[in-house]
Image (cartoon, helix red, strand yellow):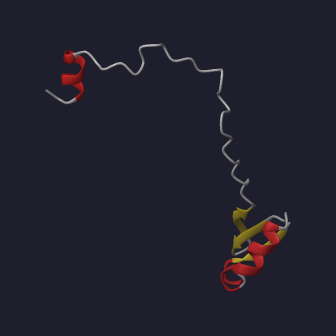
Amino acid sequence: MLIVNVHEAKTQLSRLLARVERGEEVVIARRGEPVVRLVACKPRSRRQPDVLKGKVMLPDNFFDPLPEEELEAWEGQ
């Protein structure tokens, strides 16, 4: 774990980020006291199509037109 002061972190931010991307932790300190820890973010998982296929069932009438009173309620009437 690398500990740097605020001034060094500001002037060397790109280099510190590169180190973090390689898996290192960087702690930024103010007057010798740790303030923050820089760690890499978890990569976003990619969306997978059809992940719920066969797990979610819609009733047969799901796409039927709404009854008039419910349609009016959705339209704010």
Q: Residue furthest left?
A: 77
Q: Nearer the viewer, residue 60 or 4?
A: 60
Q: Nearer the viewer, residue 33 or 24?
A: 24
Q: Residue at x 70, y 79 (%)?
A: 13
Q: Position of residue 32 (x, y in %)?
A: 74, 73
Quarter containing the C terminus:
top left
Q: Residue at x 85, y 67 (%)?
A: 22
Q: Is residue 48 left or right of residue 25?
A: left
Q: Residue at x 86, y 66 (%)?
A: 1
Q: Position of residue 49 (x, y in %)?
A: 66, 39
Vertical side of 25 occupied by 31: above or below: below
Q: Nearer the viewer, residue 19 or 27?
A: 19
Q: Residue at x 79, y 67 (%)?
A: 21
Q: Quadrant of residue 35?
A: bottom right
Q: Quadrant of residue 47?
A: top right
Total number of numbered discs in the rendering: 0
Q: Is residue 57 left or right of residue 26?
A: left
Q: Quadrant of residue 20?
A: bottom right
Vertical side of 30 occupied by 77: above or below: above
Q: Position of residue 48 (x, y in %)?
A: 68, 41
Q: Position of residue 54 (x, y in %)?
A: 66, 21
